[in-house]
Structure formats: C-alpha cells, structure tokens
Amino acid sequence: MAAPVELAPDYYLTNFRALVDFVMARYEPLLSDGERQFYTVFRVLDIDSQRLYVRLLSRKGVPSPAGALFRLGKLVYPEIDDLPRAAGRLVEAGLLRRNPELPLGECLPLFSKAELLACSPTPLPKTLKRQALELALLEQGADQAVLLHALLAAESLMAVQAAEHFETFKLCFFGNLHQDPTDYVLRDLGLYRYEDYPLDRQHLPFQSRAQIIQHLRYYDCLEQLESTLCAGPDTILALAGQLPTPAGENKGEGDGDAALHRRLDRLRLALARQLERLDELEAADQLYRRCTRPPARERRARIAVKRGDIDTGLALCREILATPHSEAERVFAESFGYRTAKREGHLPGWEPPARYRPPTQTAILPQAPERVELLAAVYLQGGSPCPQRDQCFYVENSLFNGVLGLFVWDIVFAPVPGAFFNPFQVAPSDFRTPDFYPLRRAAFEQRLAELDSHSLAHRVWRHYREKQGIANPLVAWEALPEALLELALTRIPADHWRQLFQRLLSDIAHHRNGLPDLILFPAAGGYELVEVKGPGDRLQQNQLRWLAFFAEHQIPHRVLHVEWQQP
C-alpha cells in the first residue's frame, strides 16, 4: 500500500478536471452539444469559479425546479479567495442562476426556524414544530410575497445549473450514477493502488449515443423505484413500460449491452416481485418472462403452482434442471420440483434431493474472548504453533480466492470490451455477473488446462511479488502470508486446485463465499479443510454445497463443532 499523503485544499477540483478531461478525450463524439458546451464553458473559467462550481455540484442543496439551491451568504470555502466574485462569474457563464423565481415553499427549507419566525408578517408561536411552521407560513395568503421579500432582502439564492450534463460525464466515467470522485481521493490518500489496464476507445463500454441515452433512462426509472413499490399495480406496470428497450429485445443500436440487460433485469425483478406480493400473479408472470436471469424462472414456477397450474410449474423446474443458470437455481428446482411432484402425486421422474452429511467432530474447549475459529486452530495444532508440528491457518474465503486471483491475474484484467470504464476499478465491471466467465472462457479454459504444480507456483509467486498491494477483487493481501502460500502450493495437489478453480469461476459471485474457515497442514504431509461451527451455529446452504463438492472430488474436509467446557 502506498504511503498516505496530505491532500491539497482543492484536491476535488483536480479530480473533477481529470474526470471530465478523461470523458472528453474518449467520448467526445458521443456527447451532446449541450454536454460539450458545458465542458468548454467550465474549462475557461478562472480557478476560483471552477472551485466554487465543483463544491456546489458535489453538495446536496435544497432541490427545486430551478436546480439545487444554496444561500450565497452561508457558503464558506477558505481556498476560494473571493467567493461572491466567483459566484458572479458562474452566473455570467450560465452555471449558476441568481435568485430564480420560485414559490415560497421551495425557499423555506433554506432558512432556519428562527429566521422564518423573525420574518413572518404575522407573529407565530415559537413552539411550532418545523413542519407546522412552514405550513402556517404557506397559509398566509397575500403575506407570502412580503415574507419572501423579507427573507431575500439581504440574501442571494444560487441555483446550480447544468448538473444534468455532469450526470452524463459521471455515467461515462464510472459506468453508473452512484459513484463519485471519492475514488480519486482513495487513490490520493494511498488507500488503493489500481492495476494498469488499457482504456482505448475500441474497448470502452459505450460505443454509441443510443447506449448512453438508454442508461440515463434506466437511472431515471431507478430513481422512481422506491416510490413506485409503495404504490399500486398500475403505477408499477407504468414504470415497467417506461424502461428502455435495448437492442436484443428490439432491433437497434446498442446490441450486446450486457450491463444494461443486467440492470433492467434487476429492476424488472423488483417490480415483478412486488406485483407478486400484491397478488397480481398474471402481471408478475408476464414481467418475469422478460427477465433472463435468476430468480425469474423460480418465481414463475412458484406462481404457476400457486395458481394450480402444476404441469407448468414442474415443466419450469425441468427447464431449470436442463439448463441451470446457477447452482442455487438448480438446487431450487430439485427441491421445489420434488416437493411439488410428491404433494400432487406426480412423482415419476422426480427423485428426492441428495443430502450430503460431512464427517463431523466435536471439540470441547474452554470459553475465551478470541474468535471460535482461532481457538479451533490452536486446538487442531495440538496447542502449539511449532513448525515441526501440525500447522493450521484461519483462511475462510481468502486462500482459494487469493491463489485463483494470482494465478489468473492477467485474465481478470484483460481488455475485454466494456469491462473497464476508468483507471480506478478494483475489478472489471462484469466481475460479479454471470457474464464474467463466458466472456473470458477461452482464456480461462486454456489456463486451467495448462495447470500443473510448476505452472501454478510460477504464476502465483510472480504475481505475488510483481503486483504486491495492487487491488484485485479476489486477493486479500493481508490474508496471504508467504508461509501459508508456500504450504498450500506445496501440499495441495494440482488436480484439487483445478477443480476448486473451475467451481469458483463457474459462478464467482456466489461460490467465492462459503469456503471452510481453516486449513490444516499435518506434520506428516497433506492438508485438510475444516469448517468450524461454534455453539448454536449451523451450516449454511452455500457451505453445504462446498462440502458436497469436496466429497465428490476427494478433497479432504471435516466439520468441527465447538462446545464450551462447563465450569
């Protein structure tokens, strides 16, 4: 990790400039005239005006139809030499609007309760709550104009303009609208170092203006989601009808925009699930049909069975079993299909899901403040960390994920089209999605085919030393001491590594969790994975699936149940 540094007072301006410069350099042909004009106008401003604009753009003002509102007299930024002058120049440039005409209700939130009471034409009780006070002021009829004049007599209101243009710049830089230039701050503070991957135009996620517009429309719809879910079915269906239609659903530009398809799926799933809760089952089913990812087929199967259409429900379970999108979806189809078939008398062709019972041991230990996994590790070592005896490490998900990340480092950060938006990504944008493996299938399959003890150790150690401290979504550097890596690469057979890596990569979003807590290296050789369960703790479904996988591939494992010694 890089040594922390002290940030300059206007670090935010440096970061903002870098962001908009980056987008202009790579996306200028896809930007609108208004967005290009926004960039040009901002870049010719003096430095104090730029500082003030970025400060206001990054703050949450009082929302209004005229733009986010701020009181000029309340703004204090020591790094801006002449703040009123900077504000005036922003007004001239069209990036701020001074004292926009607004109804009284839009302005009241800018003022304190004491200020509102002092300016009220009609005396009001000081005991009024804020909401009641604003309501009383809005009921003063003709006196509203007097109150507004009194509030603004010695004050200038500033409304931020062109914020919608910066939204496009943010989308192009981050690939979403929920991040902000804080990522720069993490880099500048030395908290993160990022891999150096190519960001040339041919690999950029947005290749057309239509794509940008569709993503912006998606975020407009996403902003309405929370209020829509609290409304009725008609409002939900209306929002579903507003969603953009990427090519692939309809012919047009933007074909292959997997990120937009994923986002639309998530939003449709949320809308359909709420329709289902409202017992609008037909509408929910129709919306689920437009989703291509789990749990759409699961929900459709449940809806069919709930409506008494057993054949359709079981047919959907068979479809899932024939082409499962994930292991969790397959497990659902096995369990739900069998239970439904048994209950309805359709058992032929259905078998009860196999339930694996892992080897289990119970250890009775003195209760202590340390984590139960650490106590179990000491127990398995025979109470001594001596290298000549058994050695046990608390690894949970870090060891196998970490070794995989080091082994396929170059593939993770390969310049796959659409994977990288900017220089500050810990992972490619599709890392936790079902598209991650298929888009790199050939490279992963070749790497796994070449895997033997020598090639594994060579790549892992090379990347361990060359990439030390650089962010990787699979590698937790602090959890990979050299002693652990040395033992793991020496003791675990290449075939076991290959099987583990194949399962991890097949569904990295879900399979990277649920791995055993401990790895034991007996003094006599070999290794064993140990899942620790403290008093009252039970195995989770993802842990059970890993344990069943270990049994299938002869990977040594057990479950250690810890109970406390009675005093």
Image: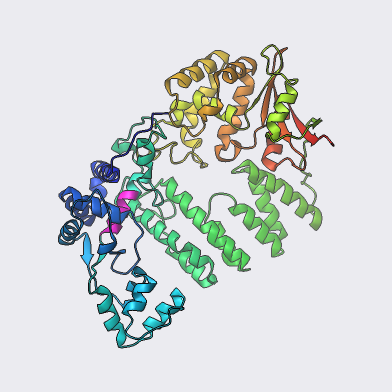
Residue sitting nearer the eye, 535 or 258? 535
Q: Identify the residue shown where x is 77% and y is 46%.
A: 349
In the rendered structure, does residue 167 fall within the stretch colored magenta? yes
Q: Which span of residues is magenta-colored?
A: 162-170
Tell me which residue sits at (36%, 59%) in the image. Answer: 60
Q: Is residue 47 magenta?
A: no
Q: Residue furthest right?
A: 566
Residue 472, how many percent across, how many down?
47, 32
Say which quadrant the N terminus sits in: top left
| Numbered marks: total | 0
Residue 560 sits above or below residue 45 on the image:
above
Residue 345 visible somewhere in the drawing: no
**Image location (x, y in percent) of residue 473:** 49, 34
Q: Is residue 246 above or below residue 411?
A: below
Left or right for 521, reference 164: right
Is residue 507 at least partly visible in the picture? yes
Q: Position of residue 379 (x, y in %)?
A: 75, 25
Helix, strand or loop for the magenta stretch, by majority: helix
Quadrant position of residue 281: bottom right
Question: Residue at coordinates 43% horizontally, 61% vertically from top-left?
Answer: 223
Residue 251 in picture, x, y percent from top left: 39, 53
> Is residue 465 left or right of 189 when viewed as pictured?
right
Q: Is residue 431 above or below residue 125?
A: above
Q: How is the image coloured?
A: rainbow
| Quadrant of the frame with the C terminus | top right
